[in-house]
Every structure is written in structure tokens, then in C-alpha cells.
Image (tube, helix red, strand yellow):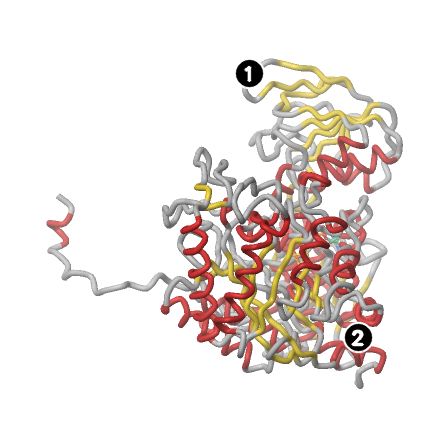
């Protein structure tokens, strides 16, 4: 299909200093959880973005010196020539598709725990280390600043030699150059502290050093956190943030505008921000410089992208998450296939991967992170190996993904869904406050299915075991989901407790089925992801009196991983929730929840009109147990987990169906032996 001419502007090349981006799609630096330990995986991931049409593809943060180490989190490094050779693979992979390669040179300063390198941590001022307690950091002396500048310059030279086109000076996310900018972290009395001009000195020098070192061939980009969102105590866009840009306006070749303070400010989830949420910040910078400006905002709509450029908000469409959810987003727009964009839902599961020091994963895109390991390509899947017909039972995320991917392979697929609509748990969860974008998990797949003549979908069809046998498909996939437990068993309690069931005791399933609550609602959360907090928000918004009780020490504790926890807790406290922490369910007696304190073992009672148990989930297993033909379970009915895991499970089944197991890739990146091992001793004598 031809490209819609309305989107032509997105495909105009643009100069960035000495290099030219082929279009306006700019994949800004983002973590992958791979770093220098997984160079092949990293290169394959970035190559997929370039192949998908991103005109600029940047790496994640790349340490310039061992004093910037975040063990065990995965970062790149350019400490020496061997690091450089490793990054050449990534550059070459990006260049093969005609894109520019950018690298984000990084020094974490006070952020760096240096647990791996055991170097002294450095910062503008001697304060407590951020993540390496009880350590302090060393306030940098002038010779430390001189050394830091030389490390940065050396890393820039290596980056150029590795083949990078855009080299970042990274003054964002509370890392070292930003720590010099902010009056919160810089209390120096010398020429690098005090006035804004002094606090800007290091950033100015870094830009000048980088330009002098590599500026003839490489663009020098500055990533700036223009607002810390700390209010008047820190850098504010309307005040010093703006003044920094005014002072340095024409010095870099490109401005990449971000937010500082907590990480969730910059990669804010859809629960707490809308598409284009950083527009006001990019627009300020655009008004102050003639250099190209880029910023992120979870852009998935080409109309919004065009509007950003036409209205002069920014010159490039910056994206991390939309490029993770759909590496082929630009090419789909180019081919007039924008209705096939797999839109990011803003759940921040990708952020959780990095926060857990594990390789990148994505709710919407099950191939993300698997480009090298399993050889999965987001747009290419093996054609069917046989004429087999496949029955998929259940149209939640797992069943939808299996049916649509099997359909793409060309199999004859029938999808039966018990309810009147597709989506399973996603329909329920997307009805919770702030989670409406989650419905995209269903919508993307339902649309694909509607375009396939080899897939039939039957709604309002709850299949029994005899129905399935009678249907006579060659293969059966059961994706019938899970249900919430009613017996108190959850993360912190591995056995059921006595709960006299009544009309006052509910699980989230009852709430979604329409249970009416009134009076005092007590939520007991031993799941710790979004459900407990989001239900609390729903009830508070409906004017109910809500107490949230949990064995953990904070509300929705696992959402620390998705950078949302403090947003959730602040919001719920602001809405008047009563929160009770570190208490574990003991039993329920009538309309009283009996608990014991995790630490003191003291006993408590909590009266309620309605109790909502958000604890563990059980797989729906009856149907599968009744089936006496071979069938495969996928998703939550195998193991209840996240939507991301359900989608992954459906995708993996579709990829592997009918394939010879011996041909399926599952590669590992291994540590390389530096030298041959000494000859082995007689094994019988090596264990005295
Ligand atoms: P998952 O996350 O594993 O996809 P969900 O709970 O979201 O699990 O979805 C399971 C879907 O399966 C629900 O939409 C449910 O209505 C459907 N389902 C459950 N049992 C049957 C059945 N016997 N026949 C057809 N559909 C079923
Ligand atoms: Fe978007 Fe969620 Fe995928 Fe991250 S994990 S890219 S937020 S859909």
C-alpha cells in the first residue's frame, strides 16, 4: 500500500551536525538489560530497530570509566580497545540498514555503586552514595575533574573508531554531569559550583572536548534533564533548565530532552501520563536553539508525530518504548500499514526488566530481547510445516497471540472464546483507573485476526471437553486463564487460611463480574502488582472508605520495578486511603479480618463491610484435566503470571508448533576464557 502523503514529513532526512539522519524516527538511548555481557544480543536488538526503519538507533548507557559501574545492572562500556571492538558489531549492524548509530557515554557519579570494580565513587560534593550504602562518595577535586574529562574524551574517540555517528554528552537522569548542574547535588564553592554559569562549566567543557575530539565526523548530542520535578529546590524547566539551554543553545549538534529526578518521571507509565507528555519541555528547547531537538512521549500515532513536527515542538520523533513494542513502526507507516502498528501500552514491564537486571522483555512484543537468543524476528515467522488445523480455546492474551501467530504462519486456526468479547483478563484490567491503554493487547491481535481468512473466531462459545474432542482439530491449545484465590494464599503465605465465605468476601473476579460494594472496604494485597492499588483507586474514586492492608512495607510494592510505586502510593494517600503495612492474614471471622504483625507477631482485628482478597491466582485446570486427547496449555492456565508472560507463552507455542526441536535456537552468551586452563590433575586426587 502506498504511504499516506500526510506522513511524508516523517520521512524527510535531517542533518545533525556532520551527519544526516535518513528520516525523523529516532530511537533514543534505552536500557536493554544486556549491556557488555551480551554483545551479540545487543547488536541483534539494535539491528532489528534499524531494519524496522528507525533512522537513528542509539545504544543504552555506556560507561566511560570503571568508576562508573552499576553491577549487577547491564551497561555498555568503553574503557579500553576490547570494549571498542565489541561495540563495532553493534555499529555495523545498525549501519547495514542505513541508519545512524548513536552512543550514550555515561558516568553515573553518585549513582554508581562500583560494586563490580570497587573504584571510589565520585560526585561534585562529598555526600552519601545513592545505592552503595553505607558508603559516601568522594567530592571531586580539580584533578578528578581533569581526569574525568580525559576519560570522556578517550571514550568519545573509541566510540568514533567503533563507528558511531552520534556521541552523547549525557546530562540526564541524575548522572554525573547533571549532578554538577543541579543545586541539590552541587554545593561546591569553586568555579564548578555556585552560580548557574559555574555549575554549567563542566557540561560546556564536555561538549567542547567531545567536539574537539570527534566533532569533524560525529554529531555531538546532549541529553539534558531539563526539569527534576523537585520544584524550586532543583532544576526547573521554567527557570534554570531554560537558562542552561540558553547558555549552551548552539553548542551541541542535537538536544535530546528528558526529565530528571526519579526514573519514572522520564519513562512515565501510561497510568500516570498521556502520549506526548513531555511536549512542553521539548517545545521550550526548540524555541531557544536552531539545532535539532528530540524528546520521547510514547508516540504511536503517526498523526500525533506529524503534529509534533509541524507545530515546531521537536524535529525528530524520539522513542524508546514504542520502538520496543514495535521495532517496525516506521516501516509500517512508510508502507501505509499504520493500522498494523503494535502500540506500546505504557505498562513499563520493559523497565522492570532493567530494574531486575534481566534482558529486555515487552508485554506487546514477545520477540523483544529474543532476536539473537532464539532468532525471533518481529515481522517474520516460519511458514506452516503442515496442513494441520488448530483449535485455540480461550481468547485472552495467550490465546490471541497463539491464534494470530499460528494464523500468520498459515495454519487453519479456530479460536473459541467463552465470553461475548475477546481479550480475557485484559478487558477487566483495562477497565481499571489509568489502565485503558492496556486494551491495545487485545485490539492489536483482534485486528490481525480480522484480516486473516484462515482464522475463524467464535465468541460466546464455552467449550467442554466433549465439544473439543468432537471438533476434531489436529491440535488443541488450551488458554483458559486463571482465577483469583479465595483462601488467603499469596506471596507471603504459602498455605490457605480459614475464610468463611460470604457475600462480603470478594476477589477481583467478583468485582469485574459486577459485585456491588458499600461502606468500609478492606483490600488485603498479597499480590503486590497493580491489582490491589488500582482497585483501591477505583473504590476511592467511587467515594468508598478504603483501607489497604498488606504484608509488604508499601503499596503495590512490585511496581517499584515498573517505576510506578511512588506515583501509586502518593496518589492513593492523596485520595485518602488508609494504609496498613507488614500485617499478614491469619483468618477471617464474620466481618473481621484477623492479622498478625510480620515483625512483632502482635495480633490485630480489622472490621469491614466488604473484604477484597488480592492474593495468589490458580490456573483454570478442569477442562484440560478432562481432555483425554493430547492438548497443550499456554498462558495463565499453565502458570498464572503477567500479561507479558501470557503473550510470550502463546507466541512461543506458535513459533515452535510442528518444528523439529533440534532446529530451535536457544543460544547463550558465555564468559570467554582469558587463557587456557592449566592441565587437569588426576580427578581422584583433586578432591582430597
Ligand atoms: P491468558 O492470560 O492466559 O490469556 P485470560 O484469563 O486472560 O488468560 O484468558 C482466558 C480466556 O479464556 C478468557 O477470555 C475466558 O473467557 C476464556 N475461556 C475459559 N474457558 C474457556 C472455555 N472452556 N471455552 C472457551 N473459552 C474459555
Ligand atoms: Fe510499552 Fe509495556 Fe512494551 Fe514497555 S513493556 S514497550 S511499556 S508495551
The residue drawn where x is 65% and y is 70% is 327
Residue 442 in the image, given as x and y percentages of width and height: 77, 60
Q: Quarter of the image containing the N terminus? A: bottom right
The residue nearer to you, when weighing 490 against 679, is: 679
Could you tell which of marks 1 and 2 lies nearer the N-terminus?
A: 2
The residue nearer to you, when weighing 163 against 445, is: 163
Q: Please say if the residues under marks 1 and 2 sit with CB atoms less than 8 Å apart.
A: no
Residue 406 in the image, given as x and y percentages of width and height: 66, 71
Is label 2 in a helix, a strand or a loop? Answer: loop
Query: Total label count?
Result: 2
Whether residue 284 is visible here, answered yes or no, is: yes
Mark 1 highlights which residue? 600
Q: Callout 2 environment at 10 Å: few (<14), some (14 to 19), or many (20+)?
A: few
The residue nearer to you, when weighing 127 against 349, is: 127
Q: Is residue 29 above or below residue 73?
A: below
Q: Callout 1 environment at 10 Å: few (<14), some (14 to 19), or many (20+)?
A: few
Residue 102 in the figure: left or right of residue 556: left
Mark 2 highlights which residue? 451
Residue 78 in the figure: left or right of residue 366: left
Q: CA distance from mark 1 to mark 2?
A: 60 Å
Residue 533 in the image, given as x and y percentages of width and height: 73, 37
Q: Is residue 613 above or below residue 370?
A: above
Is label 1 in a helix, a strand or a loop? Answer: loop
Whether residue 590 is visible here, answered yes or no, is: no
Q: Quarter of the image containing the C terminus? A: top left
The residue drawn where x is 88% and y is 27% is 518
Amino acid at each position: 500500500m502506498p504511504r499516506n502523503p500526510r506522513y511524508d514529513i516523517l520521512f524527510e532526512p535531517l542533518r545533525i551536525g556532520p551527519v544526516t539522519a535518513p528520516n525523523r524516527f529516532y530511537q533514543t538511548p534505552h536500557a536493554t538489560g544486556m549491556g557488555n555481557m551480551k554483545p551479540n544480543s545487543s547488536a541483534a536488538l539494535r539491528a532489528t530497530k534499524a531494519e524496522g526503519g528507525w533512522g537513528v538507533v542509539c545504544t543504552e548507557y555506556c560507561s566511560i570509566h570503571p568508576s562508573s559501574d552499576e553491577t549487577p545492572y547491564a551497561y555498555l562500556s568503553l574503557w579500553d580497545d576490547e570494549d571498542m571492538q565489541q561495540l563495532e558489531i553493534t555499529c555495523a549492524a545498525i549501519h547495514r540498514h542505513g541508519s545512524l548509530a548513536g552512543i550514550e557515554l555515561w558516568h553515573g557519579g553518585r549513582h554508581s555503586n562500583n560494586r563490580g570494580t570497587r573504584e571510589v565513587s565520585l560526585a561534585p560534593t562529598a555526600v552519601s552514595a545513592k545505592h552503595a550504602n553505607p558508603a559516601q562518595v568522594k567530592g571531586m577535586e580539580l584533578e578528578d575533574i581533569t581526569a574525568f574529562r580525559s576519560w570522556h574524551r578517550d571514550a568519545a574517540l573509541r566510540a568514533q573508531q567503533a563507528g558511531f555517528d552520534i556521541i552523547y554528552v549525557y546530562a540526564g537522569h541524575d548522572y554525573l554531569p547533571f549532578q554538577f548542574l543541579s543545586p541539590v547535588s552541587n554545593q561546591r564553592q569553586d568555579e564548578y559550583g555556585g552560580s548557574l554559569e559555574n555549575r554549567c562549566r563542566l557540561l560546556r567543557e564536555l561538549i567542547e572536548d567531545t567536539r574537539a575530539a570527534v566533532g569533524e565526523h560525529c554529531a555531538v548530542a546532549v541529553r539534558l534533564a531539563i526539569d527534576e520535578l523537585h520544584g524550586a529546590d532543583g532544576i526547573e524547566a521554567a527557570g534554570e533548565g531554560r537558562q542552561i539551554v540558553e547558555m549552551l543553545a548552539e553548542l551541541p549538534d542535537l538536544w535530546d530532552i528528558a526529565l530528571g529526578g526519579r526514573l519514572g518521571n522520564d519513562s512515565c507509565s501510561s497510568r500516570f501520563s498521556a502520549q506526548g507528555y513531555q511536549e512542553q519541555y521539548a517545545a521550550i528547547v526548540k524555541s531557544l536553539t536552531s539545532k535539532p531537538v528530540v524528546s520521547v512521549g510514547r508516540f504511536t500515532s503517526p498523526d500525533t508525530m506529524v503534529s509534533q513536527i509541524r507545530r515546531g515542538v521537536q524535529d525528530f520523533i524520539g522513542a524508546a518504548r514504542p520502538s520496543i513494542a514495535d521495532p517496525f513502526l516506521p516501516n509500517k507507516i512508510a508502507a501505509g500499514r499504520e493500522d498494523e502498528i503494535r502500540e506500546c501500552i505504557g505498562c513499563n514491564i520493559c523497565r522492570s526488566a532493567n530494574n531486575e537486571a534481566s534482558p529486555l522483555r515487552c508485554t506487546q512484543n514477545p520477540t523483544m530481547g529474543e532476536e539473537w537468543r532464539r532468532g525471533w524476528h518481529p515481522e517474520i515467522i516460519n511458514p506452516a510445516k503442515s496442513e494441520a488445523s488448530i483449535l485455540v480455546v480461550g481468547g485472552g492474551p495467550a490465546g490471541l497471540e497463539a491464534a494470530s501467530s499460528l494464523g500468520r504462519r498459515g495454519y487453519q486456526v479456530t479460536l473459541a472464546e467463552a465470553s461475548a468479547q475477546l481479550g480475557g483478563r485484559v478487558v477487566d484490567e483495562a477497565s481499571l483507573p489509568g489502565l485503558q491503554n492496556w486494551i491495545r493487547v487485545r485490539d492489536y491481535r483482534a485486528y490481525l485476526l480480522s484480516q486473516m481468512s484462515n482464522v475463524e473466531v467464535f465468541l460466546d462459545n464455552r467449550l467442554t471437553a466433549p465439544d473439543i474432542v468432537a471438533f476434531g482439530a489436529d491440535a488443541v491449545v488450551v488458554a483458559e486463564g486463571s482465577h483469583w484465590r479465595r483462601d488467603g494464599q499469596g506471596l507471603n503465605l504459602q498455605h490457605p487460611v480459614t475464610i468463611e465465605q460470604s457475600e462480603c468476601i470478594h476477589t477481583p473476579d467478583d468485582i469485574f463480574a459486577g459485585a456491588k460494594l458499600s461502606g468500609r472496604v478492606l483490600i488485603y494485597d498479597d499480590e503486590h502488582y497493580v491489582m490491589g492499588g488500582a482497585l483501591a483507586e477505583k473504590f476511592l474514586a467511587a467515594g468508598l472508605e478504603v483501607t489497604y492492608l498488606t504484608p509488604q512495607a508499601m503499596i503495590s510494592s512490585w511496581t517499584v520495578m515498573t517505576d510506578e510505586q511512588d506515583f501509586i502510593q502518593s496518589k492513593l494517600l492523596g485520595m485518602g486511603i488508609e494504609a496498613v503495612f507488614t500485617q499478614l492474614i491469619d483468618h477471617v471471622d464474620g466481618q473481621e479480618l484477623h492479622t498478625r504483625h510480620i515483625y512483632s507477631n502482635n495480633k490485630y482485628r480489622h472490621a469491614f463491610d466488604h473484604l477484597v482478597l488480592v492474593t495468589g491466582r490458580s490456573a483454570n485446570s478442569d477442562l484440560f484435566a478432562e481432555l483425554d486427547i493430547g492438548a497443550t496449555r499456554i498462558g495463565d492456565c499453565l502458570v498464572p503470571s503477567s500479561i507479558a508472560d501470557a503473550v510470550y507463552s502463546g507466541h512461543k507455542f506458535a513459533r515452535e508448533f510442528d518444528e523439529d526441536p533440534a532446529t530451535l535456537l536457544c543460544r547463550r552468551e558465555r564468559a570467554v576464557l582469558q587463557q587456557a586452563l592449566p592441565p587437569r590433575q588426576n580427578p581422584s586426587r583433586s578432591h582430597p
